[in-house]
Image: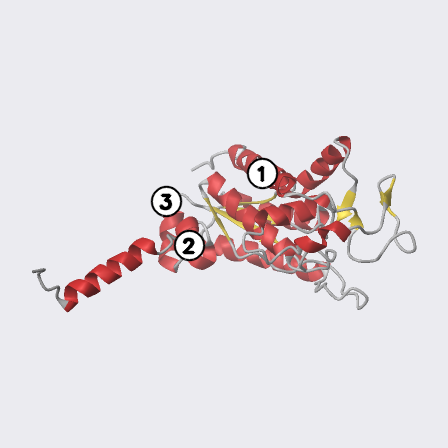
């Protein structure tokens, strides 16, 4: 005769089975512990600074129309993923929340853009950098995913602040190569027989496809029609020569493989440049 099983035992067996069958989730907290400023407590920031994580990464995104296939906040998705990967690779950095707006102008004909002015961005970058310094960061890196304001505005803010704080052993730099990697990638694609793109084309769409882990950032069913204003001799031909749909170029041959290639290149270039900035610093005299 089988032994009776107590209610407590049955409950324990049921809970154990549920735990074993549940998926193991890697949360953003697990992945970004100690590198994502907004997901750290003030004590964690304090301890990270004391342990040598004294580089602050300030990355700007943007909200704008990017064709029928890409959502308006694509810059912000790419910016967050890129700066997160850069922080992981550097090992001594913490990234601030991505600034979600950049210089741009809304257009009622294509209602997808929310822009700020150059003056506002300049003041925001200055303020964010100075707040980072007040918190205790010794190196502040400015970067952007959207082209507006680059390189002049970012460079001007970085140079002015670096001049102001360098005597205290604190530096502010503009990392331009994370953005200019796009230009080199475009040239490489054209050399490989892909059509040219300037906005919402193959590089943008491919990178977003690579990062679209929840299938909410790209409308893949529309990529077959993702063609916009043509590019002739490197210049966009806006108007009657093509649809005004947020694309300058042709995104129809976009792929996740190309997106990974561009993403890895951006991270690699940025990490190398930032390490170069810090390596050239000279110890301050006592």
What secondary structure is marked by label 1? helix
- Is residue 43 positioned above or below 268 on the image? below
The residue under the point 49% across, 39% down is 89
- Is residue 60 positioned above or below 177 on the image? below
Q: Which residue position is annotated with label 3?
A: 51
Q: Position of residue 129 (x, y in %)?
A: 56, 54
Q: Position of residue 226 (x, y in %)?
A: 76, 51
The residue under the point 41% across, 54% down is 29
The residue under the point 45% across, 42% down is 92
Q: Position of residue 88 (x, y in %)?
A: 47, 43
Q: Which comes before the other along the chain, label 1 or label 3? A: 3
Q: Which residue position is annotated with label 1?
A: 264
Residue nearest the viewer, comparing 104 with 4: 4
User: Hey, which residue is sitting farthest top in the picture?
Assistant: 191
Residue nearest the viewer, comparing 187 with 258: 258
Residue nearest the viewer, comparing 145 with 224: 224
Specify the label residue 27 is tagged with: 2
């Amino acid at each position: 005769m089988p032994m009776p099983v107590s209610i407590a035992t049955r409950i324990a067996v049921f809970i154990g089975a549920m735990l074993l069958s549940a998926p193991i989730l890697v949360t953003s907290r697990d992945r970004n512990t100690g590198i994502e400023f907004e997901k750290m407590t003030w004590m964690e920031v304090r301890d990270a600074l004391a342990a040598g994580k004294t580089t602050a990464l300030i990355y700007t995104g943007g909200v704008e129309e990017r064709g029928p296939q890409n959502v308006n906040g694509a810059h912000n998705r790419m910016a967050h993923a890129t700066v997160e990967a850069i922080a992981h690779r550097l090992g001594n950095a913490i990234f601030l929340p991505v600034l979600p707006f950049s210089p741009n102008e809304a257009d009622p004909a294509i209602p997808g853009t929310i822009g700020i002015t150059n003056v506002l961005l300049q003041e925001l970058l200055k303020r964010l950098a100075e707040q980072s310094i007040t918190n205790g960061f010794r190196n502040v890196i400015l970067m952007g995913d959207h082209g507006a304001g680059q390189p002049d505005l970012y460079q001007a803010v970085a140079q002015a602040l670096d001049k102001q704080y360098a005597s205290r052993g604190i530096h502010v730099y503009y990392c331009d190569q994370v953005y200019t990697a796009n230009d080199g990638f475009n040239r490489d694609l054209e050399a490989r027989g892909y059509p040219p793109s300037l906005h919402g084309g193959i590089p943008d769409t491919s990178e977003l496809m690579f990062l679209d882990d929840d299938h909410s950032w790209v409308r893949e069913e529309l990529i077959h029609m993702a063609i916009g204003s043509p590019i002739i001799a490197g210049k966009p031909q806006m108007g009657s020569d093509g649809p005004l749909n947020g694309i300058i170029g042709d995104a129809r041959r976009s792929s996740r493989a190309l997106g990974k290639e561009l993403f890895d290149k951006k991270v690699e270039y940025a990490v190398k440049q930032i390490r170069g900035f810090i390596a050239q610093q000279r110890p301050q005299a006592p």
